[in-house]
Amino acid sequence: MSTVLIIFYFLSAITLSTAFLTIYSRNPIHSAIYLVVCFFTIAGHYLLFNAQFLAVVHVIVYAGAIMVLFLFTIMLMNLNNEDEVHKPRITRFGAITVFILLSSALVLIFMYTKPFVGEYPTTGEDFHSIKKLGTVLLDDKDGFMVPFEFASVLLLVAMIGAVLLSKKEKTGK
């Protein structure tokens, strides 16, 4: 068995187990930490596909920004175990059953599919470089600059809204 295949199986096992623990954990902080580990292992899968830029962006965007947002939301809502309504055992049993069925179906699909054998058609262009990505995103003829700027303004407005929502009002006495 090749080293890449061993790394793939190892990362897949960690990804599936931390995804399950994210859902099954009762403590919201532990769930957030399990989700961060799951994001890092998915970035490892991107590295196995030789997509370094996607791996770095995945870590920065998901494991960095979104998980910080989740943690702030959890801390802002002050979720405690005492306040949480516990799920009945039949619900937990159903979730475990669905997880096992879906996992086994995915394993069977991966076992019985045949990989692509042969040559991929190539154009000779380097699509992995950041320069090429920047040219595609910000070139004037393709028209992706305006949606890119809209997304940045939208993120700025969302950040300002989150700060205003989390700001406590002063009580006047």
Image (cartoon, rainbow, N blue to C red):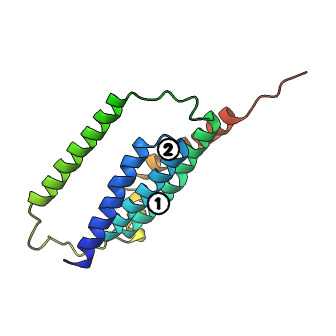
Mark nearer the viewer, 2 or 1 = 1
**Which residue is nearer to you in this view: 130 or 65?**
65
**Which residue is nearer to you in this view: 35 or 86?**
86
Residue at (25, 39) in percent of width and height: 97
Residue at (61, 43) in percent of width and height: 72
Mark nearer the N terminus (2 vs 1): 1
Does 3 appear above or below 14?
A: below
What x and y, as percent, mark residue 42?
Answer: 37, 59
Does 127 appear above or below 145?
A: below
Which residue does the numbered mark 1 point to in the structure image? 59
Answer whether residue 142 is visible to the viewer in this image. Answer: no
Q: Is residue 48 left or right of residue 2?
A: right
Q: Is residue 16 left or right of residue 139?
A: left
Residue at (67, 35) in percent of width and height: 166
Which residue does the numbered mark 2 point to in the structure image? 150
Residue at (30, 40) in percent of width and height: 96
SS class, disc 2: helix
Give the quadrant of the C terminus.
Answer: top right
Whole-angstrom CA distance, mark 2 to mark 1, is 23 Å
**Which residue is nearer to you in this view: 153 or 17?**
17
What x and y, as percent, mark residue 8?
Answer: 28, 67
Dot 2 alpha-carbon crowd within 10 angstroms: few under 14, some 14 to 19, many 20 or more:
few
Q: Amino acid at mark 2?
A: Phe
Q: Which of the 4 image quarters holds residue 41?
A: bottom left
Q: Amino acid at mark 1?
A: Val
Q: Is residue 107 left or right of residue 147?
A: left
Give the quadrant of the N terminus.
Answer: bottom left
